[in-house]
Amino acid sequence: MKAGEAARAVFEAEFGSEPEGCWCAPGRVNLIGEHVDYAGGLCLPIALPQVTTVAMRRRADGRLRIRSSGFDPVDIDLRDRQIDGWAAYVAGVAWALEPPGFAGADIAIASEVPVGAGLSSSAALETAVAVALADLCGLPLDDEGRERLAEACVRAENDYAGAPTGGLDQRIALHGRAGHALLLDFADGTSDHIPFDAGKQGLTVLVVDTGTGHRLADGQYGQRRREVEDATRLLDVGSLREARSAEPIADPLLHRRARHVIGEISRVRQAAESLRAGRIRDLGPLLDASHRSLRDDFEVSCLELDTAVDAAVAAGALGARMVGGGFGGSVIALCEDARVDDVRQAVADAAARRDLPAPAFLRASASGGARRC
């Protein structure tokens, strides 16, 4: 059952009526540009075909009733600011967006985006809720309106749910376009759709969910942000986007953190140039270099991610790297179509040899953004 059908079925079973509509938003995978969005950097994500769907009907009593298969039911008062857990990603959007005339809702959720896999299931949920509220409450859904929704979702995640993410996930979920990657510039807020159709060149972007969940609110992600801020102050620049080199930093840890950010921004520029020229295969070495930097300089990888990357490259992938915030989650591997099965088998075998969780696989194709469905 597709997520839209599942959300509607849950809604009708739980609330005994039909929703006013269903809205969906995609997960994402970032081709390159990790841990640079909050440093004024460049990122190059695509929206996934896998979506999270919300079915919604408005209420008038200030209550928010949320249902999702596999999670405990949540009934809350919108005036309660102490909401924790997964429901905070729903209530936080209503809090941040303040849609006109909104006084509560019944919401059912179904998702195809793996939770904890580094594919931004939280942003998919937030942006699906945001688009639903905007549509029902008369807020604009043009590019400018979607940018405002993205800003509200970032506030919801940062200030309400307590997860210090940088905004990449919400923007690609709202602005994604089929057959394109989205070059996001976090220095000036601009974006550019760049054609990206790996299939036309006989290539596959294979996503490997290592089965090792991660939590962005557990302190590690926030610690890396603080280290980037410290490095920025030491270099006396507005953001690391303005820095040419990490060499002036004497502190070895902060030097490595800055070196990753500066190098990663450069790799994104190279990747965007390659895609504009239609040279998708040139991404391979850039993915490899990105993973080495995330592993060694930024120290956000782990055994499961490194094992999957090493196995994929050894089996013939053009390049591979961890994606997302790190400390678990997923890997992407750029593969020739003819080598996909070899890569999958090699990654699965490597995990088994090390007694790691059995990985799951999906093929990523650039898809559209949040919408009524």
Image: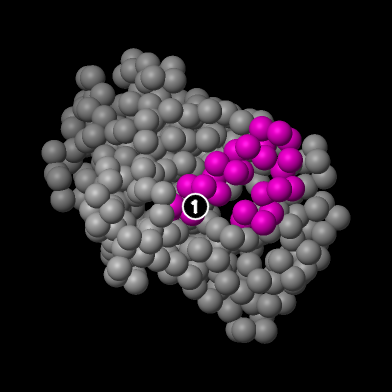
Identify the image quadrant of the C terminus: top right
Q: Residue furthest right?
A: 338
Residue depicted at 82% across the width and 45% down the height: 202
Q: Which x, y percent locates residue 76?
A: 21, 44
Q: Which x, y percent locates residue 171?
A: 43, 35
Residue closest to the eye, 280 or 333 = 280
The stretch in magenta equals 261-287
Say which quarter of the image contains residue 314: bottom right
Q: Is residue 265 visible?
A: yes
Q: Is residue 141 left or right of residue 273?
A: left
| Residue 285 located within the stretch drawn in magenta | yes
Residue depicted at 33% across the width and 60% down the height: 248
Q: Which x, y percent locates residue 153?
A: 33, 37
Q: What residue type is labelled 1?
A: Glu
Say which quarter of the image contains residue 257: bottom left
Residue closest to the eye, 92 or 35 = 35
| Residue 77 located within the stretch drawn in magenta | no
Identify the image quadrant of the N terminus: top right
Residue closest to the eye, 141 or 13 = 141
Residue under label 1: 264
Residue depicted at 66% across the width and 32% down the height: 276
Vertical position of residue 173 compared to residue 340: above or below: above
Vertical position of residue 138 compared to residue 322: above or below: above
